Image (spheres, rainbow, N blue to C red):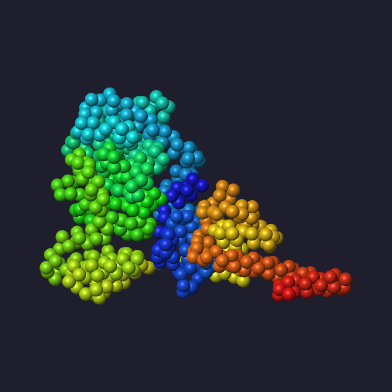
C-alpha cells in the first residue's frame, strides 16, 4: 500500500486538491486561505507545495494530502487513498495484485529493459549507414551530443529488439510493460532514429522514435506510451543533461521538440529542455523550479502556441516562476532550423526573451483590428482575462495601464472588465463534512508544537529547552522531536533528518508552522517567545499535577486519612505558589 500511496502523492499537487475546498492565494513560497474546519475570518490555513504539507492554525490540524481528504470528507485512510488514486489516474489493482507487491522492484526491471534497449539501438546505429547519414549529415549532430543523448537506431524489422531482450532473460510481459512492443507483440519502434527519454537521474524510461523517411500513413514521431516508469505529463526531456547548463546560465529554456533540445546542446546551448510533445503541466515546471526561477519558452506563435503560453502563465504563477517568451526570427520555424543556420541567432533569441504577459498582449494586438471598436473590445477582453489571473497587485496595475493605453481606454474600463471576469469565474468550493476548533485541552499541545517548531528554526533558543522535562511533554512524536533538538543544539533543520524519518509528516508540519509564524521575527523576539512558551508549558504541567493531587485529596478525605490529607494539602499549596510565580 505504501507504493500506491507514493505513486498517488507523486502525481497530485496538494494545492490543487486543497484548492477544491479552500480558496488559496499565494503567500511567498506557500499558499494561504480560510480554514475549512472553523469559521475564522482571517486566513490561517497554510499549504506548502514544496513540503506537500498543510497546516491549519485555527484548528491545530495538519498533515499530507491524504490527511486533508480524511479530515474534510470524514473518511478513513483507505477511502482517501482510493479517492485520490481515481483523481490521479492510478490503477490501484496494479499495486494490490499478488505479483506486484514490490513496485520498486518492478520499476527497476522495466528501467533495466529500457537501458538495454538503448544500448541495442546505439549498436544498431553504428551498423546502419543510412541512419548514420541522417544523424551526422542531415541533422548535423556531433559525436559528443549523440553519445550524451544515447541516440540510436531501431532496425526496420518485426521483432529484432524483442528477440534481443528475450535472450537477456526478459519475458514478453516485461517488454510490453516497458513500453517497447506494439499490440501484436512485435517491436513498437521500427526504422526510426531513437532518442531515449531519461529521468532526472539519467535512467532511460522510454523513447522518442523519429521516422528515417516520412511516409503518408506513418507518424513522423512515435513516443513510448504511458507506463509504470514513464508519465509524459511529468517528463522533462533532456533534464539530466541540462542541469549543469541551467545552473550556469541561471535560466532554463523550454522548446517543443526533443530534437530541438539535441541540436541546441550540440551547439553548446545546454540549458534547453522539452516537454516531450505534450502540453505544459505543473509537474514540468516543478521539475525546473528546483534549479532556477527563470524559465523561457520557445513555443510557436500560432493560435495553439498562444493558448499554450496563456496556460503556462497560470502554471508559472502557481509555482513561483518568472516566465518569458522567446520569439523565433522571421523565416525560421523551430530552434533546430535556427541552429542549423547559425547558432548565434538562437542564443540571441534566448537572450532577447520578452515577459510572457507582454508577448501575449502583443499577439492579441496583431490579431485584432485596433482601429475599430469591435477590435478594441475583443483585445481588451482577452487581455483582461490574462490580467485577472495575475497574483501580484503591482504587476496587475502595470498591465491595466498598458492595456488601457493600447486600446485607448480608461484604466477604470479595463478594471471593470477584470472584475466582471473574476465574478463570473468565482469558484464554488466543496464543503468540509465536519468542523473542528481547538479545545482547552489542546492548548498544551499547541504550546509544545510552537516551542518545538521555533527550536527547529532557531538553534539559539534550544538552550531554554533544558527546563522542559520529558514528563511535561508526555509521549509520542513531539517528545521524540524535542529530544532530538535538545541533543543537536546547533543544527538548523530545513528538512526531516534521517533519525526522525518515521515522524516525517509531523516534522514538516512543524517546519511549515515555524516558517509561517516566526520567519519574520528577529532573534530577540524569537528568544522571548521561546521563554514564554517554556513558562506556559511549565505552568500547564503544574496545573495537571495540582489536579491529580486534588483528586487524591478527595479520596483521602473520603477515607478519613488525616496524615495523607495534611501531606497533600502541603503539596497543593506549594504548587499553587509555583503556578502564581510566588
In the rendered view, tell whether residue 399 sits above or below residue 170.
Answer: below
- Give coordinates of residue 394: x percent, y percent: 32, 68
Residue in view at x 56 percent, y 67 percent: 525
In the rendered view, tell whether residue 334 sits above or below residue 406.
Answer: above
The quarter holding residue 486 reads bottom right
Q: Is residue 21 visible?
A: no
In the rendered view, tell whether residue 1 sits above or below residue 363.
Answer: above
Number of disc labels: 0
Q: Nearer the viewer, residue 389 or 172?
A: 389
The quarter holding residue 277 reads top left
Residue in view at x 32 percent, y 29 percent: 122
Q: Is residue 99 visible?
A: yes
Image quarter where the C terminus lies is: bottom right
Residue in view at x 11 percent, y 68 percent: 371
Relative to residue 233, is residue 107 drawn left or right?
right
Q: Nearer the viewer, residue 519 or 213?
A: 519
Amino acid at each position: 500500500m505504501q507504493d500506491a500511496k507514493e505513486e498517488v502523492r507523486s502525481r497530485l499537487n496538494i494545492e490543487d486538491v486543497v484548492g477544491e475546498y479552500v480558496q488559496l492565494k499565494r503567500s511567498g513560497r506557500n499558499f494561504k486561505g480560510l480554514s475549512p474546519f472553523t469559521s475564522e475570518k482571517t486566513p490561517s490555513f497554510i499549504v506548502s507545495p514544496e513540503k506537500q504539507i498543510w497546516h491549519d492554525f485555527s484548528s491545530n490540524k495538519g498533515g499530507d494530502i491524504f490527511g486533508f481528504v480524511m479530515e474534510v470528507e470524514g473518511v478513513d485512510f483507505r477511502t482517501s487513498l482510493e479517492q485520490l488514486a481515481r483523481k490521479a489516474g492510478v490503477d490501484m489493482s496494479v499495486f494490490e495484485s499478488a505479483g506486484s507487491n514490490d513496485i520498486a522492484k518492478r520499476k527497476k526491471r522495466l528501467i533495466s529493459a529500457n537501458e538495454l534497449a538503448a544500448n541495442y539501438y546505439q549498436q544498431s546505429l553504428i551498423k546502419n549507414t543510412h541512419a548514420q547519414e541522417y544523424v551526422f549529415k542531415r541533422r548535423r549532430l556531433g559525436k559528443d551530443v549523440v553519445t550524451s543523448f544515447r541516440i540510436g537506431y531501431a532496425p526496420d524489422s518485426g521483432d529484432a529488439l524483442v528477440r534481443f531482450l528475450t535472450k537477456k532473460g526478459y519475458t514478453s510481459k516485461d517488454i510490453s510493460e516497458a513500453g517497447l512492443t506494439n499490440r501484436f507483440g512485435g517491436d513498437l519502434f521500427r526504422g526510426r532514429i531513437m532518442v531515449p527519454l531519461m529521468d532526472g537521474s539519467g535512467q532511460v524510461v522510454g523513447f522518442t522514435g523519429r521516422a528515417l523517411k516520412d511516409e503518408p500513413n506513418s507518424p513522423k514521431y512515435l513516443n513510448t506510451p504511458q507506463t509504470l516508469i514513464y508519465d509524459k505529463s511529468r517528463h522533462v526531456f533532456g533534464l539530466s543533461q541540462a542541469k549543469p547548463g541551467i545552473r550556469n546560465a541561471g535560466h532554463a529554456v523550454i522548446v517543443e521538440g526533443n530534437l530541438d533540445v539535441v541540436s541546441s546542446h550540440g551547439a553548446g546551448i545546454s540549458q534547453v529542455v522539452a516537454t516531450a510533445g505534450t502540453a505544459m503541466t505543473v509537474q514540468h515546471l516543478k521539475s525546473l523550479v528546483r534549479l532556477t526561477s527563470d524559465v523561457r519558452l520557445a513555443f510557436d506563435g500560432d493560435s495553439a502556441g498562444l493558448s499554450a503560453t496563456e496556460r503556462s502563465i497560470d502554471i508559472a504563477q502557481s509555482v513561483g516562476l518568472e516566465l518569458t517568451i522567446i520569439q523565433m526570427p522571421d523565416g525560421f520555424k523551430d530552434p533546430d532550423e535556427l541552429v542549423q543556420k547559425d547558432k548565434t541567432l538562437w542564443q540571441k533569441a534566448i537572450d532577447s526573451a520578452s515577459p510572457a504577459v507582454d508577448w501575449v498582449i502583443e499577439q492579441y494586438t496583431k490579431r485584432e483590428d485596433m482601429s475599430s471598436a469591435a477590435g478594441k473590445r475583443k483585445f481588451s477582453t482577452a487581455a483582461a482575462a490574462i490580467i485577472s489571473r495575475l497574483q501580484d497587485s503591482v504587476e496587475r496595475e502595470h498591465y491595466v495601464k498598458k492595456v488601457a493605453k493600447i486600446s485607448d481606454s480608461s484604466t477604470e474600463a479595463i478594471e471593470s472588465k477584470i472584475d466582471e471576469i473574476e465574478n463570473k469565474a468565482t469558484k464554488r468550493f466543496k464543503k468540509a463534512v465536519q468542523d473542528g476548533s481547538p479545545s482547552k485541552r489542546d492548548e498544551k499541545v499547541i504550546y509544545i508544537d510552537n516551542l518545538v517548531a521555533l527550536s527547529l528554526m532557531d538553534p539559539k533558543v534550544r538552550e531554554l529547552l533544558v527546563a522542559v522535562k520529558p514528563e511535561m511533554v508526555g509521549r509520542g512524536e513531539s517528545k521524540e522531536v524535542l529530544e532530538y533538538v535538545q541533543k543537536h543544539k546547533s543544527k538548523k533543520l530545513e528538512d526531516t533528518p534521517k533519525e526522525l524519518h518515521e515522524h516525517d509528516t509531523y516534522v514538516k508540519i512543524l517546519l511549515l508552522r515555524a516558517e509561517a509564524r516566526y520567519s519574520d521575527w528577529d532573534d530577540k523576539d524569537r528568544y522571548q517567545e521561546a521563554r514564554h512558551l517554556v513558562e506556559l508549558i511549565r505552568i500547564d504541567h503544574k496545573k495537571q499535577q495540582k489536579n491529580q493531587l486534588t483528586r487524591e485529596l478527595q479520596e483521602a478525605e473520603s477515607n478519613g486519612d488525616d496524615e495523607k490529607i495534611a501531606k497533600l494539602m502541603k503539596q497543593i499549596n506549594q504548587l499553587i505558589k509555583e503556578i502564581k510565580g510566588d
